[in-house]
Amino acid sequence: MNMLVLILGIVVFLGIHSVRMLAPQWRLDRIAAMGEGTWKGVYSLISLAGLVLLIWGYVLARPLAPVIYVTPFWMVHLTILLMALALISLMVSNLKPGKLKPILKHPMLLAVKLWAFAHLLVNGDLASIILFGSFLAWAVWNRIAVKRRGGALPQPGPVINDAIAVVTGLALWALIVWKAHVWIAGVPVPIA
């Protein structure tokens, strides 16, 4: 039952985030019929419901999930490094373009891939494999779909925007390593 809640949450959350890939015309028809604001509201509510379900399901399933693999402790340090890169990529995605945004092409998807892969390196229980593996597979699939769809990449901006993205990404990373991972996931980052 616990694993089903996790899987349902993943299906709802990643499902709504896959509508543009799976049913682009249906999405455009809904936006035309509902209006963009209403569509974004419904989209956000479904996303939030999926997120709540997957977090709740993960919290329920993880303590009971069988451990499939255990990695050496040094993988924690690689994970911490990958998470720094993921958070920088996340900030590149969300801030004004500098030189990095056009180079990375789709920094949000890169951030998701790095986040998911990094967590798979150190979490070998079945619940974690399902959660992070699903996000990794989705991000890879989405990146392929975006490439096939084409479209213009952002124009390069000033390097100062990259500096701001790097500094804010590293600040967010430091906050997560310091305390926020306990608030988010209930466990500290094992630094030593």
Image (tube, rainbow, N blue to C red):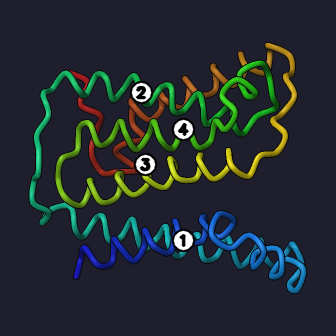
Kindly report which numbered mark, 2 or 1, lies closer to the viewer in this rendering: 1
The 10 Å Cα crowd at callout 1, few under 14, some 14 to 19, many 20 or more, is some
Q: Earlier in the sequence, mark 2 or mark 1?
A: 1
How far apart marks 2 and 4 lie (CA) works out to 9 Å
Q: Which mark is residue 82?
A: 2
How far apart marks 3 and 4 lie (CA) works out to 10 Å
Q: Earlier in the sequence, mark 2 or mark 4?
A: 2
Amino acid found under the numbered disc labelled 4: Ala
Q: Secondary structure at mark 2?
A: helix
* Picture quadrant of residue 119: top left
The image position of residue 105, as x and y in percent, is 70, 33
In depth, the one of 58 and 190 nearer the eye is 58
Kindly report which numbered mark, 2 or 3, lies closer to the viewer in this rendering: 3
- Which quadrant holds the N terminus? bottom left
How far apart marks 4 and 1 lie (CA) works out to 19 Å
Amino acid found under the numbered disc labelled 1: Gly
How far apart marks 2 and 3 lie (CA) works out to 14 Å
Q: Secondary structure at mark 4?
A: helix
Q: Are marks 2 and 1 in contact (CB under 8 Å)?
A: no
In depth, the one of 178 and 134 nearer the eye is 134
Q: Are marks 3 and 4 in contact (CB under 8 Å)?
A: no
The image position of residue 22, as x and y in percent, is 62, 69
Q: Which mark is residue 136?
A: 3
Q: Which mark is residue 111?
A: 4
Left or right placement of residue 105 versus residue 64 in this view = right
Write the residue at 76% across / 27% down: 102
In depth, the one of 158 and 174 nearer the eye is 158
